[in-house]
Amino acid sequence: MAEGETESPGPKKRGPYISSVTSRSVNLMIRGIVLFFIGVFLALVLNLLQVQRNVTLFPPDVIASIFSSAWWVPPCCGTASAVIGLLYPCIDRHLGEPHKFKREWSSVMRCVAVFVGINHASAKVDFDNNIQLSLTLAALSIGLWWTFDRSRTGFGLGVGIAFLATLVTQLLVYNGVYQYTSPDFLYVRSWLPCIFFAGGITMGNIGRQLAVYECKVIAEKSHQE
């Protein structure tokens, strides 16, 4: 080859760092989409149960789906589920405390089943008063955290999620978006924070398990390269 001649540039191969960042970005988006649709599905099923038992009441003009749910409920729950499911493993990573307790899909599915059971109990189990029901659901929610999580991060985020979600719900009820039958705690039912706490733990477990799968995929790709 003569001097001064330059070699024709061929297709450049991405470095391992760029490839890793791209893979993580794509996997993050995929995890968010999966969590969104899981949240939408759970919202439709659980809200149907609440409406059928007359625990929550929507005005007739906002009933807009075959599941007797206001149209905005599933997207809001799906978005919240995606945020929560991505937040749990992110905080675990930043704190340097990877969550390794019962990290398999069978445990996650049992956690989802228990959460659905807690929500079912809030609508169908009859107690003498709301205090007994609230205490029972609180015990079940903490039991769910102890059985499937046991991390300080999970408990702290669950409490924070319960507080914020209950506050948003109170504002919605106050503005007449919908209402609860027999409210006993600032426009809502006193057991509602327990449901939000259990829901946060459940979506956090799903998000953590999806993150574990992502790490395995990235590790296998890096090993192949």
Image: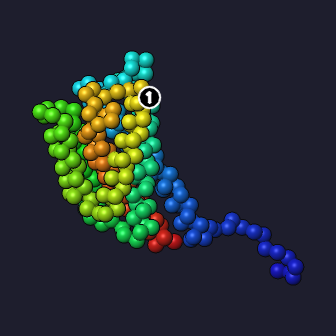
Q: Which of 222 and 22 is in front in this view?
A: 22
Horizontally, is 2 left or right of 210 in the view?
A: right
Could you tell me residue 53's position as x and y percent? 23, 26
> Looking at numbered disc 1 in the image, what kind of residue is underneath it?
Asn
Corner quadrant of residue 88? bottom left
Corner quadrant of residue 122? top left
Could you tell me residue 55's position as x and y percent? 26, 28
Identify the residue position indicated by label 1 in the image.
175
- Residue under the point 46% across and 72% down: 223
- Residue under the point 67% across and 67% down: 12
Could you tell me residue 115's position as x and y percent? 25, 45
- Residue under the point 18% across and 39% down: 131
- Residue under the point 48% across and 70% down: 222
Q: In this view, does 131 lie above or below 99?
A: above
Q: Residue furthest top?
A: 60
In the rendered view of the protein, which quadrant contains the N terminus? bottom right
Q: Is residue 203 in view? A: no
Q: Is residue 54 in view? A: yes
Q: Which of 44 and 135 is in front in this view?
A: 135
Corner quadrant of residue 156? bottom left
